[in-house]
Amino acid sequence: MRESSPFAFCRRLDARNRPYRTEVQLHKSLCALLRGIDRDVVTAVQREAISRVRCLARGIEYRFFKTYGLEIDDTRTVYPLCAWNLVPKDDEPSVCLMRDWALLPSA
């Protein structure tokens, strides 16, 4: 891992990249972002930003559970198929549940 400058981070999220299509993709990318942070070198302002990202991830988890009755990282969701990356891959699922993904003709 290496530290990313704000410019490099924003370039990584370039508008030409495919947007998140599911809550699962968004949640997994937020987790990847949090996992890539070296907490020993963050400033107070950065700690506040990290706290906000964690809060967003928890909110997504809560809404997902209320909608589907499953934890977002349950094996019955497409969570294992989504990349640990800020930018979703082209072949990632476009639905949240594994059974729905298996029924799609393009799966």
Image (tube, rainbow, N blue to C red):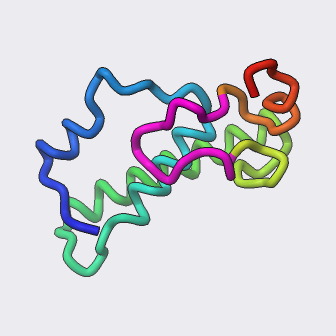
Within the magenta stretch, is there residue 89? yes
Position above or below: 75 against 22: below
Magenta region, residue range: 79-93
> Could you say which quadrant of the image residue 103 lies in?
top right
Quadrant for the C terminus, please. Answer: top right
Q: Does the magenta stretch mainly form a helix, a strand or a loop?
A: loop
Q: Position of residue 4 (x, y in %)?
A: 18, 56
Position above or below: 85 against 2: above
Q: Which residue occupies 48% across, 37% down?
A: 88
Q: Position of residue 47 (x, y in %)?
A: 28, 64
* Residue nearest the observer in this picture, 71 or 59: 71
Is 107 positioned to the left or the right of 100 in the image?
A: left
Q: Position of residue 74 (x, y in %)?
A: 78, 54
Q: Which residue occupies 26% across, 29% down?
A: 14
Position above or below: 62 against 20: below
Q: Which residue occupies 23% across, 61% down?
A: 46
* Residue nearest the observer in this picture, 55 or 19: 19
Q: Position of residue 84 (x, y in %)?
A: 50, 53
Quadrant for the N terminus, please. Answer: bottom left
Is 16 positioned to the left or the right of 29 in the image?
A: left
* Residue nearest the observer in this picture, 81 or 40: 81
Is 35 positioned to the left or the right of 70 in the image?
A: left
